[in-house]
Image (cartoon, rainbow, N blue to C red):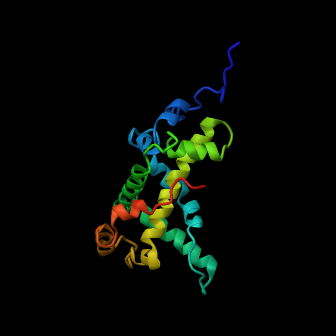
């Protein structure tokens, strides 16, 4: 007798569904570079979820209006191509930094899937790769919004402030090496 483990009997659901072996053998960063995972789509579809994960100090004003305005502000910023590309670039840096194979010879998303198994192995791998992207986005928001800096990113006309963008890109305000090293990616 030969024993075989069958994880998921379904054929590819769509063209976007990744093969389990490909997800096991490649880092999240590699799959993003190969355009098998869309960071842009994940940002656009899940930014409100990420905002809810980013804690803010207790506010003495109307909490509902504060968070509604916060969502509106980030939506406006993410609709700006320059800001969107800047955030996406930061996420790429974080994913690249965390793309090395660990001491246990597994990519970080595979380690995460092994710890917190949800559904089939393929589904767990898909979920953990999305989680890594969302954690990188949360790290971007937390870092860029230190001391409520994001309140100054939009001008009175609701356009991206060129000065804010220039400062955000400055290595004196945001050292990318330090930024990626401080990212807590891969922790559930």
- Furthest residue to the top? 1
In this image, 156 relative to 12: left or right? left
Q: Locate residue 18, reporting x and y percent.
A: 52, 34
To which quarter of the image does residue 150 belong?
A: bottom left
Instruction: Identify the residue at the far front of this view.
Output: 103
The residue lying at 57 percent from left, 79 percent from top is 57
Viewer-proximal residue, 81 or 91?
A: 91
Quadrant hosting residue 118:
top right
Tell me if residue 150 can be seen. Answer: yes
- Above or below, 22 against 47 in this view is above
Q: Residue at x 60, y 81 (%)?
A: 58
Q: What residue lies at 47% left-to-right and 44% top-to-bottom?
A: 28
Q: Position of residue 163 (x, y in %)?
A: 29, 75
Horizontal arrangement in the rendering, residue 4 relative to residue 40 (left or right): right
Q: Nearer the viewer, residue 20 or 67?
A: 20
| Residue at figure coordinates x 38%, y 54% from the top left | 93
Vertical placement of 58 versus 41: above or below? below
**Quadrant of the snapshot with the C terminus:** bottom right
Viewport quadrant of the N terminus:
top right
In the rendered image, residue 185, in percent from the top left (x then y), is placed at: 51, 56
Q: Residue furthest bottom?
A: 60
Q: How many marks?
A: 0
Task: Tell me if residue 79 can be seen.
Answer: no
- Taking depth in this image into account, of 147 and 161 the one nearest to the observer is 147
């Amino acid at each position: 007798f030969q024993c075989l483990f069958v994880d998921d009997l379904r054929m590819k659901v769509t063209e976007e569904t990744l093969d389990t072996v490909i997800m096991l053998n490649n880092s999240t960063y590699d799959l993003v570079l190969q355009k098998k995972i869309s960071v842009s789509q994940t940002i656009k579809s899940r930014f409100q979820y990420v905002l809810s994960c980013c804690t803010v100090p207790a506010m003495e004003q109307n909490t509902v209006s504060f968070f509604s305005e916060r969502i509106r502000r980030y939506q406006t910023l993410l609709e700006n191509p320059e800001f969107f590309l800047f955030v996406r670039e930061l996420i790429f840096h974080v994913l690249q930094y965390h793309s090395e194979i660990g001491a246990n010879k597994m990519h970080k998303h595979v380690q995460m899937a092994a710890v917190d198994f949800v559904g089939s192995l393929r589904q767990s791998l898909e979920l953990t790769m999305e989680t890594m992207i969302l954690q990188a986005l949360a790290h971007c928001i937390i870092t860029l919004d230190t001391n409520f800096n994001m309140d100054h990113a939009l001008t009175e006309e609701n356009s991206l402030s060129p000065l804010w963008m220039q400062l955000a890109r400055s290595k004196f305000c945001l050292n990318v090496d330090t930024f990626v090293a401080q990212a807590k990616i891969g922790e559930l």
